[in-house]
Image (cartoon, rainbow, N blue to C red):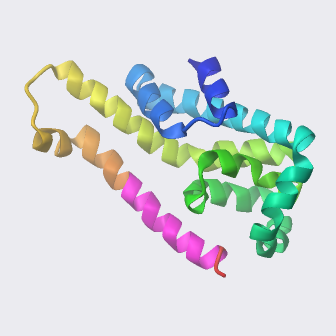
Amino acid sequence: FLIFSILWTFLLGFAGPVAIFSGFLFGQWFGTLISVVSFSVGSTLLYLFVQYYFRDLAINHLESKIERYKNLFKKNELLYFMIFRFIGGGGIPFAIQNILPVVFDMKIKNYFYATFLGLFPTVFIVNSLGSGFEKLIEKNENLSYLDVIFDPVIYWPIIGFIFVLIISFFIRKKIFKK
């Protein structure tokens, strides 16, 4: 599963379904660890690939769109990229988030750690949903939509996700204001 997740991320796959499935298969904590490690390694491999083979293309295409963030980013690339990952990349697709740091010429070590730490809270929440679904299925009862929504194994991750969204909104407004 780890190798699949790394390849999936490297090949520009969506992270959400893999995180839910990982939670379903491996549980809340171990599934989160597997997901975050695989997303971090896959993202780092994609970053290195683009850095070595498509650097000029990425810079020519993306630099004008993020020029205003270059000075901010150079102050502390680890912190700002970790916050960027935490807030979900500001709505930027995961695959594009993985290659943006090419424009900033980010150090590989900082890229990996910022990805690992920045993805952890959100992946934990999504993974918890997958784990919650597995627990509900394990009960093998007739479930209604209300039973699913009001079960603590489902509504706590949803509340956590809403909390992360609210925090992300305020962080984005404060740090990445225009």
Question: Residue 152 at what x, y percent from top left?
Answer: 23, 42
Q: Estimate the x, y position of residue 53 in percent, counting from the top left.
A: 90, 39
- Residue depicted at 50% across the width and 31% down the height: 18
> Residue at coordinates 48% horizontally, 66% vertically from top-left?
167
Q: Position of 26 compared to 140: left or right?
A: right
Name the image quarter holding the C terminus.
bottom right
Q: x%, y% of residue 65?
A: 75, 68
Tell me which segment is drawn in magenta: 161-175
Observer-nearest residue: 12 or 152?
A: 12
Q: How many marks?
A: 0
Does the image show residue 76?
Answer: no
Please tell me whether residue 100 belongs to the stretch shown in magenta: no
At 30% from the left and 47% from the top, the residue drawn is: 156
Q: Overall secondary structure of the magenta stretch?
A: helix
Task: Tell me: residue 116, above or below residue 100.
Answer: above
The furthest residue to the bottom? 178
Q: Is residue 160 left or right of residue 19?
A: left
